[in-house]
């Protein structure tokens, strides 16, 4: 999950995206909100985890994350070098990519926490979940800030 990234780290590169793509602040807020909504509506990863287990869920989440990051990178790259003028650069394109990213992050989160919690006894699963989530937040905080 730490390698996959977090949709909450959008602010780390939001200012560069705003400058490069000539976005307004409200557009950046919509992009960030779409990532959070995608993370909260990550039903696809949960259903995949319940039906097929953790490996297909990790593959699904990684694929969604890669596709989203790659498409955003290509759009920013084309904007920076001013090539391929027909490639989408509108902020709604970034909103969709951010929503897809949020779904991928939710799938990775489901696979990582769900698999680890299943390894423990039913009586201590709540404590285990709390420890894993708080440790994940601390690691992300240390890495990004």
Image: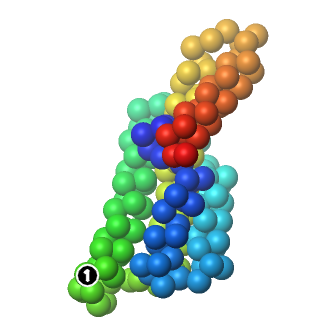
144 or 124: nearer the viewer? 144
- Rendered residue at 39%/68% (across/down): 72
43 or 106: nearer the viewer? 106
Most extreme residue toward the front is 145
- Rendered residue at 61%/28% (across/down): 135
Please say whether residue 44 is visible from this viewpoint.
no
Above or below 143: residue 81: below
- Rendered residue at 37%/54% (across/down): 66
Q: How is the image coloured?
A: rainbow
Residue for badge 1: 81
Label 1: few (<14), some (14–19) or many (≥20) C-alpha neighbours in 10 Å: few
Q: Secondary structure at mark 1?
A: helix
Above or below 42: residue 125: above
Residue 35: x %, y % from top left: 58, 61
- Rendered residue at 71%/26% (across/down): 130
Q: Is residue 114 left or right of residue 5?
A: right
Where residue 136 sits, quadrant-wise, is top right
Where residue 67 sits, quadrant-wise, is bottom left
Callout count: 1
Q: Is residue 74 left or right of residue 31?
A: left
Above or below 74: residue 130: above
Residue 117: x %, y % from top left: 61, 21
Q: Is residue 64 left or right of residue 11?
A: left
Please say whether residue 119 is visible from this viewpoint.
yes
77 or 118: nearer the viewer? 77
Residue 59: x %, y % from top left: 38, 42
């Amino acid at each position: 999950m730490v390698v996959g990234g977090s949709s909450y780290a959008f602010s780390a590169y939001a200012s560069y995206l705003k400058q490069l793509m000539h976005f307004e602040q409200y557009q950046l807020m919509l992009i960030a909100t779409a990532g959070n909504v995608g993370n909260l509506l990550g039903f696809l990863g949960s259903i995949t985890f319940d039906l097929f287990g953790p490996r297909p869920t990790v593959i699904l989440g990684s694929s969604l994350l890669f596709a989203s990051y790659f498409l955003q990178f290509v759009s920013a790259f084309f904007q920076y070098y001013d090539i391929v003028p027909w490639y989408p650069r509108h902020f709604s394109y970034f909103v969709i990519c951010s929503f897809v990213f949020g779904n991928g992050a939710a799938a990775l989160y489901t696979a990582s926490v769900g698999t680890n919690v299943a390894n423990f006894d039913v009586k201590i699963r709540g404590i285990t979940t709390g420890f894993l989530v708080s440790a994940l937040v601390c690691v992300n905080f240390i890495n990004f800030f």
